[in-house]
């Protein structure tokens, strides 16, 4: 206990002594920190940008749904195997019904039949939709996108194949610039559909490639009636709110689908169960590598800064040889001298780190204009930690040199 | 009571392939309360002896016991502790920290002794008062005269209440009058019961002590008490000052 107290006291004195030394040599200390300042600015800005980029990516694929499993003929990002997927049996509405019946645990399950954009008309106006979806009322729970006016279609609308639809914000704006779209009839492929809801604004997905606000969603029964597509493969979306149950549900879906699609034992699945995760994994694999390379390169600037500090600390030790001799003569132990120079290097680096943060914080606000990010608190802590470590690393050799000086020779030094 | 006992001390430096015998077989004893001068021409080994006595260096051969403790085989940190607690150094070139004020310079040995800050300040102020610098506490060395700087150094040596004061040519960088003032201060310190070891090459300075040890070629040439000890007299100094 007494020993710990002594170490704390020694550390405190070491810090006070080095603060004195830094105060005396302000200009040199500030110039020395420059290397660290630049390094910290580079690393923190880079990290913030990388985190922002990832957040932007996640945001742009968030329409897929974090906890949703998609049963599909195609493996997402399956790449060159698409020919094999294309020859698989379709996923059909019938399979959806069977899966829904057999699946023991889920929060929502919906079939999604999809087709590319079509021209939509209202009176003399027209608009092009990005996608047209045919699904059931449960889709609302899966997409978590709510209508901000009107309502989503109901189970009854689906069952009775009522000619109703829900439209995206952009379509509503294009077709109904001055009036309320609700209960107006629009024309889709020559069929009249009554608008019963307008979805809230979502922005665009996949880095702006798909406008989520120009989609049209209708009951799947209506979709089959007016667009057809019973022969095309569909997706079955299964939502599981409890993250921990997702893997179990996935296994159950796999087993049921194999039974439904009569896949013989030992043969691989002839369908895929996809998740948003695959996009994130792909992102991490590609952009992640670039990001790591970027951080490594910027870290090099920190390394250069550390070498600069080490150099100055060596000069400082030589310059203060006599001072070290005096301190040793009057009773400074090896570790006290070591601590003094080590804390000097560390304090210089921490000051550099703080200056660096003061510069990179406004920079992160600038980045925020383009990417959804602010400098995370973790990055601030990381920057200070890095500064501390750089201080220790660049200070240890000069400090050791100082601590090892022979007092007799040091006192004689001119 | 013996503070210092040297038995057959030798110090050999290796300069390249050559061996330099700085000290050969030195034995001596110094008691508590003594005022000893170590004299000798340059090359006699007096600096080496001072470094060993001051625990700045260890002997190659022989036994050095300080207050009954064998210090000849101690490591650097143990020696540092002895220096810190038992020895007060006064150097020819003062060896103050140039950018720290008098108070901080005097505080320094107490910092390394682990004395808490408030106690430290009080003791440093008292030491400065004792050497007559109560009004120069916050002056830096370059704002002080040579004599005042040496007083700060003496205050620094006294502040830890060491067993011995080790002064290496303390008047070497001072004019005669200031030197005499410093010697007067040493006399006061001696009269208060402190043990002083004075290293000098000036006969006149050495005669302030009560015993002179003369070194030549790394050996003790003579070790005798001073018959007519020169006791500095402030009024004599003043008279001298006026006549000049």
Image (cartoon, grey):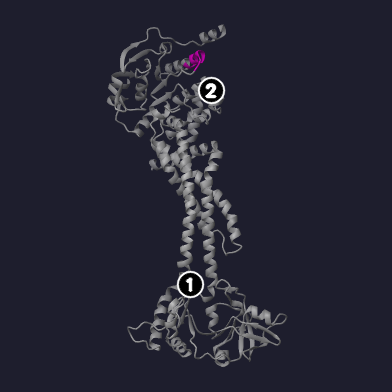
- Distance from disc 1 to disc 2, alpha carbons, whole Å, reads 77 Å
- State whether the magenta stretch is mostly helix, strand or loop: helix
| Crowd class of label 2 (few under 14; some 14 to 19; many from 20; radius 10 Å) | many
Asked whether the viewer can see residue A304, the reply is yes
Q: Are marks 1 and 2 on the same chain?
A: no
Against A136, is B59 above or below?
A: above
Q: Position of residue B5 (x, y in %)?
A: 30, 21
| Crowd class of label 1 (few under 14; some 14 to 19; many from 20; radius 10 Å) | some
| Residue at x 55%, y 67% (from the top left corner) | A56
Chain letter for mark 1, please: A
Write down the region rendered in magenta. B174-182
Would you name the residue on which mark 2 appears? B133
Residue B4 bears which disc, if any? none
Name the front one of labels 1 and 2: 1
Chain letter for mark 2, please: B
Against B12, is B78 above or below?
A: below
User: Image quadrant for the N terminus of chain A?
Assistant: top left
Q: Tell how many labels.
A: 2
**Quadrant location of residue A74?**
bottom left
Q: Position of residue A174 (x, y in %)?
A: 68, 80
Against A44, is A257 above or below?
A: below
Q: Nearer the viewer, residue A410 or B214?
A: A410
Left-right relation of A79 to A367: left
Q: Position of residue A359 (x, y in %)?
A: 58, 52
Would you name the residue on which mark 1 appears? A279
Asked whether the viewer can see residue A336, the reply is no
Magenta-drawn stretch contains A242: no
**Quadrant location of residue A199?**
bottom right
Q: Position of residue B132 (x, y in %)?
A: 52, 20
């Amino acid at each position: 206990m007494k020993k710990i107290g002594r170490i704390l006291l020694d550390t405190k004195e070491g810090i006070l002594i080095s603060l004195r030394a830094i105060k005396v040599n302000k200009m040199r200390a500030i110039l020395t920190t420059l290397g660290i300042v630049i390094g910290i600015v580079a690393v923190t800005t880079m990290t913030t940008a990388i985190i922002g980029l990832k957040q932007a990516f996640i945001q742009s694929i968030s329409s897929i749904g974090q906890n949703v499993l998609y049963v599909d003929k195609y493996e997402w990002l399956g790449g060159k195997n698409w020919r094999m997927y294309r020859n698989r049996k379709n996923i059909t509405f019938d399979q959806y019904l069977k899966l829904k019946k057999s699946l023991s645990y889920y929060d929502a399950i919906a079939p999604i039949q999809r087709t590319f954009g079509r021209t939509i008309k209202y009176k003399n106006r027209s608009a092009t939709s990005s996608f047209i979806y045919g699904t059931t009322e449960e889709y609302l729970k899966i997409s978590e996108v709510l209508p901000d006016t009107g309502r989503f279609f109901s189970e009854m609308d689906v069952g009775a194949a009522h000619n109703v639809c829900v439209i995206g914000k952009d379509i509503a704006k294009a077709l109904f610039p001055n009036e309320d779209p609700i209960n107006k009839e629009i024309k889709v492929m020559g069929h009249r559909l009554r608008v019963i809801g307008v979805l809230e604004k979502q922005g665009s997905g996949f880095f702006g490639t798909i406008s989520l606000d120009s989609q049209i969603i209708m009951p799947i029964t209506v979709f089959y009636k007016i667009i057809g597509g019973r022969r095309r493969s569909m997706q079955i979306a299964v939502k599981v709110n409890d993250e921990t149950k997702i893997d179990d549900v996935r296994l159950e879906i796999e087993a049921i689908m194999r039974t439904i699609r009569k896949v013989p034992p030992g043969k691989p699945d002839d369908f895929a169960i996809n998740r948003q995760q695959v996009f994130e994994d792909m992102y991490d694999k590609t952009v992640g590598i670039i990001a790591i390379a970027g951080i490594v390169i910027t870290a090099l600037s920190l390394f250069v800064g550390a070498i600069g500090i080490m150099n100055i600390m060596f000069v400082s030790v030589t310059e203060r040889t006599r001072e070290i001799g005096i301190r040793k003569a009057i009773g400074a132990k090896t570790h006290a001298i070591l601590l003094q120079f080590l804390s000097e290097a560390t304090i210089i680096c921490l000051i550099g780190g703080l200056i660096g943060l003061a510069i990179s914080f406004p920079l992160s606000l600038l980045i925020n204009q383009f990417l959804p990010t602010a400098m995370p608190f973790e990055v601030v802590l990381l920057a200070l930690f890095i500064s501390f470590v750089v201080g220790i690393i660049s200070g240890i050799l000069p400090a050791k040199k100082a601590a090892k000086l022979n007092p007799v020779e040091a006192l004689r030094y001119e | 009571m013996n503070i210092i006992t040297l038995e057959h001390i030798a110090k050999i430096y290796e300069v390249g392939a050559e061996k330099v015998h700085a000290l050969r077989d030195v034995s001596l004893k110094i008691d508590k309360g003594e005022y000893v001068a170590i004299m000798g021409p340059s090359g006699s080994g007096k600096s080496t002896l001072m470094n060993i006595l001051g625990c700045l260096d260890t002997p190659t051969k022989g036994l050095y016991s300080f207050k009954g403790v064998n210090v000849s085989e101690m490591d650097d940190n143990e020696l540092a502790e002895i220096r810190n607690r038992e020895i007060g150094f006064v150097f020819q070139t003062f060896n103050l920290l140039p950018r720290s004020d008098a108070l901080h310079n005097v505080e320094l040995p107490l910092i390394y002794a682990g004395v808490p800050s408030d106690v430290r300040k009080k003791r440093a102020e008292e030491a400065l008062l004792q050497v007559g610098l109560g009004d120069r506490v916050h002056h830096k060395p370059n704002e002080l005269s040579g004599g005042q700087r040496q007083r700060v150094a003496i205050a620094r040596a006294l502040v830890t209440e060491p067993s011995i004061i080790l002064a290496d040519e303390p008047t070497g960088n001072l004019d005669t009058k200031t030197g005499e003032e410093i010697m007067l201060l040493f006399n006061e310190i001696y009269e208060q019961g402190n043990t002083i070891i004075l290293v000098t090459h000036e006969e006149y300075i050495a005669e302030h002590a009560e015993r002179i040890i003369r070194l030549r070629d790394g050996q003790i040439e003579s070790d005798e008490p001073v018959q007519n000890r020169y006791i500095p007299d402030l009024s004599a100094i003043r008279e001298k000052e006026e006549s000049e």
